[in-house]
């Protein structure tokens, strides 16, 4: 595994360097050598090695100072320390810096050197594999979302296109039967067509803005507006499947510091999941949206009437590729990506439970998702606490 990674080795004794060079060159992808901390830091900035292995006692800049400087550049870089001393103070400083391994010299047994380096390499490979999987899931999620969006566009366009063709057909019929066509009739027809055409244009803009949005942009976002934008994108799909949307907004608007587009994507995923669950039901179908808040957090509660989630799979629904739907309907990516967005991107949390409730004199049962978002950034929260 170590053979897949580059290593920067830092040591001020030339004899030791030559001995270690012979041990390390065949074990790593590429070996770089520096003879003091200053040279090593400069070299690190140029080549960005995967792993750093450094002696502690060196002139100009010792190993711990070097490690501290490198960690400021990249907190996640794995660093190993070599030293002839076994002092508690050195160990304590190494732990504080997040040093990955601490190896005492002299190295009489090669395994004492290679085992911790191989362990570091194994951890690095695990992170790389996890990132590759995450990228694959993101691509699959985007493809799935694109498919859903195309379906939503079709739903939203069907009604206005029908109105446009009705207006045009009516005018054609009047001409075919030689009926007198007045100015007011023409005006009414063209106004109707223009109105529906404008709706179609706005729909295109809504979807285009959704897909073109900068997912790295963090700003103060109105939850009321974010929910409205999400519903604008999915409400036609829900209504065409005879799902009634029941919204219970908060009395006052709530603002959070997040990326709006990521929240919209998470909300759409939950809406689509609810639709897929309820679409085959014969009874009246409902989708409830409620917004609330307390002193520190905002809450978005999304509840369907789809009968709930089987208890034996409740703890699996946020896992990648897990789905209770037929493969032609569900990929098992939507809720996984929703969890990833809420927890890892928006610094929030998401929970799900089954709930029974009454609405419009009907006893209903379904799944209820609760999204919790912090009202403050960490910096704002600390400032708020300090001001109390």
Image (cartoon, grey):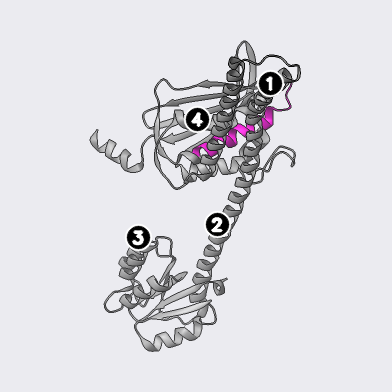
Q: Is residue 275 magenta?
A: yes
Task: Identify the mark nearer the N-term, 2 or 3.
Answer: 3
Task: Identify the mark nearer the N-term, 1 or 3.
Answer: 3
Q: Nearer the viewer, residue 179 or 331?
A: 179
Q: For marks 1 and 4, give the one nearer the viewer.
A: 1
The quarter of the picture where the C terminus appears is top left
Residue at 53% across / 68% down in the picture?
A: 121
As drawn, is 194 to the left or to the right of 283? left
Q: Residues within 10 Å of mark 4 (few under 14, many from 20)?
A: many
Residue at 57% across / 56% down in the picture?
A: 130
Dot 2 falls on a residue whose secondary structure is helix
Mark number displayed over residue 227: 4
Q: Are marks 2 and 3 in contact (CB under 8 Å)?
A: no
Mark number displayed over residue 131: 2
User: How far separated are the C-alphas under marks 1 and 3?
Assistant: 80 Å
Dot 4 falls on a residue whose secondary structure is helix
Mark number displayed over residue 96: 3
Q: Are marks 1 and 4 in contact (CB under 8 Å)?
A: no
Residue 243 in the image, given as x and y percentages of width and height = 65, 23
Task: Identify the mark nearer the N-term, 4 or 2.
Answer: 2
The magenta-colored residue range is 263-282
């Amino acid at each position: 595994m170590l053979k897949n990674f580059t290593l920067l080795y830092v040591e001020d004794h030339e004899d030791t360097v030559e001995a270690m060079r012979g041990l390390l060159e065949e074990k790593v992808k590429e070996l770089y050598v520096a003879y003091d901390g200053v040279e090593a830091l400069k070299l690190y900035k140029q080549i960005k090695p995967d792993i750093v292995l450094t002696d502690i006692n060196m002139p100009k800049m010792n190993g711990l100072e070097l490690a501290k400087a490198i960690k400021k550049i990249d907190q996640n870089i794995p660093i190993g320390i070599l030293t002839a001393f076994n002092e508690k103070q050195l160990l304590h400083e190494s732990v504080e810096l997040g040093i990955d391994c601490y190896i005492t010299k002299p190295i009489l047994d090669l395994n004492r050197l290679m085992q911790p380096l191989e362990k570091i390499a194994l951890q690095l490979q695990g992170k790389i594999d996890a990132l590759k999987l995450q990228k694959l899931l993101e691509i699959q999620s985007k493809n799935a979302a694109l498919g859903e969006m195309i379906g939503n566009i079709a739903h939203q366009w069907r009604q206005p296109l029908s109105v446009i063709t009705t207006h045009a057909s009516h005018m054609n019929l009047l001409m075919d039967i030689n009926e007198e066509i007045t100015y007011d009739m023409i005006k009414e027809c063209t106004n109707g067509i223009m109105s529906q055409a404008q709706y179609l244009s706005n729909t295109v803009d809504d979807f285009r803005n959704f897909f073109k949005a900068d997912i790295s942009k963090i700003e103060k976002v109105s939850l009321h507006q974010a929910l409205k934008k999400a519903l604008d994108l999915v409400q036609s799909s829900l209504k065409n499947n005879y799902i009634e949307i029941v919204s219970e907004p908060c009395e006052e608007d709530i603002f959070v510091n997040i990326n709006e587009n990521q929240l919209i994507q998470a909300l759409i995923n939950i809406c689509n999941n609810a639709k897929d669950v309820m679409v085959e039901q014969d009874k009246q179908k409902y989708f409830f949206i409620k917004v609330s808040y307390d002193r520190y957090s905002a809450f978005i509660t999304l509840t369907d009437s789809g009968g709930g989630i089987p208890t034996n799979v409740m703890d699996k629904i946020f896992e990648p590729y897990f789905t209770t739907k037929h493969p032609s309907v569900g990929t098992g990516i939507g809720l996984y990506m929703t969890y990833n967005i809420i927890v890892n991107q928006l610094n929030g949390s998401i929970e799900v439970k089954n709930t029974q409730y009454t609405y419009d004199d009907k006893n209903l049962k379904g799944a209820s998702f609760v999204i919790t978002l912090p009202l403050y950034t960490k910096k704002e929260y600390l400032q708020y606490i300090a001001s109390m």
